[in-house]
Amino acid sequence: MHQKTDTNAKWTHRLLTVLFISLLALFAIRIAKAETLVLAAADSRPTAYMENGKPAGLLVDIVTEAFRRAGYPIRIELKPWARCLSEARDGIVDGVFSSFKSPEREAFLNFTAVPVMTQVEALFVRTNSTIQFDGDLSKLAQVKIGVIQSTSYGEKIDGMINTGTWNKVSKTISIDSLVRMLAAERFDLAPSYRDVFLTAAKKAGVADQVRELSPSVESVPSYLAFNKKKDYSRIIIAFNKAMEEMKKDKTLDAMNDQYMK
């Protein structure tokens, strides 16, 4: 009888131990999921900018809604794009948006499967410029180009810069300075995401001093991406699922219509 009681006590102790460990594991998972993710984005209208002391814009709305559905709290920080990438590389921020894929970035970033948006890359010159574009980027080899530091402009334009075909390249830190410098004749041509450039030109009061060349260069999908310092695989899966839901229920269409009028 005494032996049976001891056996029951041991099994009870084991069950309690297993239950306790399971509860701790569940609690740890919930804590990990509740931890606020810090995401960085470039400060540029209409995609991500400060309004009434809070981040706003098309990309901000998309990413915020996707993580609300996925069940992860986030904090968005706006800063120069080069700093966004460097802080992601060093693990200071959890992720960045929105980023084009490139071999260089895939070395330190894990990209989501679903793009947050597709960006139309175009070329801009001053209104009185005689520069013409027929779709062949190599014909612009002798033109003075302006770009934003650490920014990817898609495979075609990046190729022109990385191979040295475009070798007269000046760099600045933001879309606002890029627009002002083009208008001020610091360089003669600037590649940019169409809507961001046009919005910045209007904001700077130089919309009548710059114009877009036709045709556009290409449409490039851009993504949310996480640093490789931690394992974000479950979060990426949840984000992809939320984005697919937002595509199906037309939430993404409604958000694009709101900003791209």
Image (tube, rainbow, N blue to C red):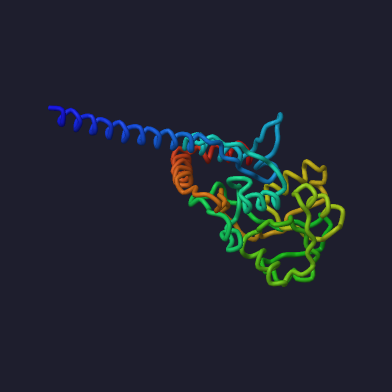
**Residue at (75% x, 71% y) in the render:** 141
Q: Foreground: 64 or 34?
A: 34
Which corner quadrant of the image does residue 128 belong to?
bottom right
**Residue at (77% x, 70% y) in the render:** 167
**Residue at (65% x, 56% y) in the render:** 121
Which corner quadrant of the image does residue 59 belong to?
top right
Residue 44 appears in the picture as rendered: no
Residue extending furthest left? 1
Q: In the rendered view, tell whether residue 229 sits above or below residue 250.
A: below
**22 relative position to 113: left or right:** left
Q: x, y percentage for residue 157?
A: 67, 64
* Image quadrant occupied by the C terminus: top right
Q: In the rendered view, tell whether residue 194 sits above or below residue 164.
A: above
Q: x, y percentage for residue 237?
A: 44, 46
Q: Foreground: 247 or 20?
A: 20
**17 relative position to 241: left or right:** left
Q: x, y percentage for residue 245?
A: 44, 40
Which corner quadrant of the image does residue 234 belong to?
top left
Q: Total number of numbered labels?
A: 0
Q: x, y percentage for residue 195?
A: 67, 47
* Image quadrant occupied by the N terminus: top left
Residue 92 appears in the picture as rendered: yes
